[in-house]
Amino acid sequence: MKSLGKLTLIHHPLCPYAARAHLALLYKGIEFEEKIVDIKNKSEEFLRANPLGKVPVLILEDGTSIYESMPIVELLDTLPQYQHTTKLYPTDPIEKAQAEMKIARLGSFINCLYLYVNKGEEAFKDWDKKINTFEELIGDQPFLGGAS
């Protein structure tokens, strides 16, 4: 397995999906450098790292880029060199699948908040439905996955 070496996270502070990868790195105590991208004026270098033109992007020391928040988080949680850190996902396959389903359902809620920053009130169409989904998923537990 290739070593990741020095990591660089390319992100934007207002993007909730980039925040997911950023928080995963911080939570697991993994050292990394940050580059904040101007998402309205994307450089050629950034577009080579992610042809989709979206953040986050994790750049490995050898120049390999991993983009999209969920693959980044999954990578950080499964690599042997980070097994000593706190797990982000349950180890049981069924519980992991259920956690991923919750994350997918929350995507529309997170997207609504992100769109509000860019489009204003139009983003709050069906807001009540999204809030109810969020509250159903969380329930009376302190975290999405339960008590810890």
Image: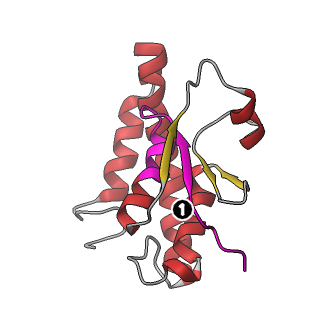
Is residue 82 or residue 126 the one in the foreground?
82
- Residue ID at (25%, 73%): 147
**x%, y% of residue 83?**
48, 83
Using residue 123 as the reference point, say whether residue 43 is left or right of it.
Answer: right
Q: Is residue 19 above or below residue 76?
A: above
Q: In the rendered image, which quarter contains the C terminus?
A: bottom left
Is residue 135 or residue 89 the one in the foreground?
89
Looking at the rendered structure, the kind of residue marked 1 is Val
The residue beneath circle 1 is 73
**x%, y% of residue 135?**
31, 50
Stretch of the chain drawn in magenta: 1-22
- Residue ID at (73%, 56%): 64
Q: Count every numbered label the image shows and give the total.
A: 1
Neighbour tally class for label 1: few under 14, some 14-19, many 20 plus, Cα within 10 Å = some
The secondary structure type at the circle numbered 1 is helix
Image quadrant where residue 144 sits: bottom left
Residue 20 magenta: yes
Using residue 139 as the reference point, say whether residue 41 is left or right of it.
Answer: right
**x%, y% of residue 41?**
63, 18
**x%, y% of residue 37?**
55, 31
- Residue ID at (48%, 18%): 118
- Residue ID at (58%, 57%): 70
Using residue 113 as the reference point, say whether residue 2 is left or right of it.
Answer: right
Residue 11 magenta: yes
Is residue 68 or residue 136 the one in the foreground?
68
Image quadrant where residue 3 sits: bottom right
